Image (cartoon, rainbow, N blue to C red):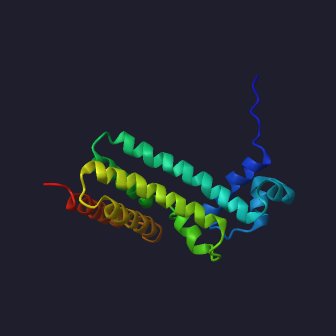
Amino acid sequence: MTTSAKPGPRERLLLAAQELTYAQGVGVGVDALLKAAGVARRSLYEHFGGKDGLIAEMLRRSTAEDEARYRATMAEAGDDPRARLLAVVDRLGRIAADPDFHGCRYLAADLALTDPDHPGHEVTRAYRRTLHGLFADEFTALGHARPEFAADQLLILVDGLLAAGATRPDRRAADASRELAEHVIDSGRPV
């Protein structure tokens, strides 16, 4: 007979924060986080120094998971940079069209965390730099005339798609984003 170990307080706090902040935003109360994690307040301070530290670490964990998903999506699309970039947009379009989609946790966090020095902002900035780098590498491999600028455009498109997906529950944003992505990709390709 095997028994599975229950995650410790740190892990339970991170899981609760990932779930509750996605559903309710980063303004979710400490008491709700503690209750969902089934831990004492002391655990929050021992492991994270407080709610700000928990939010930053939860964002760090989420960005690592999402970055891995981006990489997997691109890898599954094969070796063609155009196909790899469009696979990302197509996947995000499907996610944004899902009825349970609540928007981009990183955009939501950046908008809700009004303190410009909140540690969560550096995590979201680093995540966007990573995505920019992934996109710029693909545009470079494609031979795009302005890979860095095209990566900027694609990042804006991704943010817009995810924001629209949270506010409009239909496929129109996904379809429009796909067409815009094709334009960004093809406009700088060598002939």
Query: Where's residue 81, x and y in %?
Result: 29, 47
Task: Answer above or below: position of 73 versus 60.
Answer: above
On-image quarter of the C terminus: bottom left
Residue 157: image location, x then y, percent: 37, 66
Q: Is residue 161 above or below residue 7?
A: below
Spot the residue most to the top.
1
- Which residue shows up at 62% across the image and 75% down it? 116
Does 63 sit left or right of 29 as displayed? left
Question: Does any portion of residue 171 appear in the rendered image?
Answer: no
- Is 59 placed left or right of 188 in the picture? right
Q: Position of residue 115 (x, y in %)?
A: 65, 76
Determine the residue positioned at 83% across, 55% down: 46
Q: Is residue 70 left or right of residue 86?
A: right
Closer-to-camera residue (75/131): 131
Quadrant holding the N terminus: top right
- Residue 83 relative to residue 156: left or right: left
| Residue visible at 41% across and 69% down in the picture | 160
Q: Residue at x 33, y 47 (%)?
A: 84
Residue 112 lies, in percent from the top left, at 61, 74
Q: Quadrant of residue 45?
A: bottom right
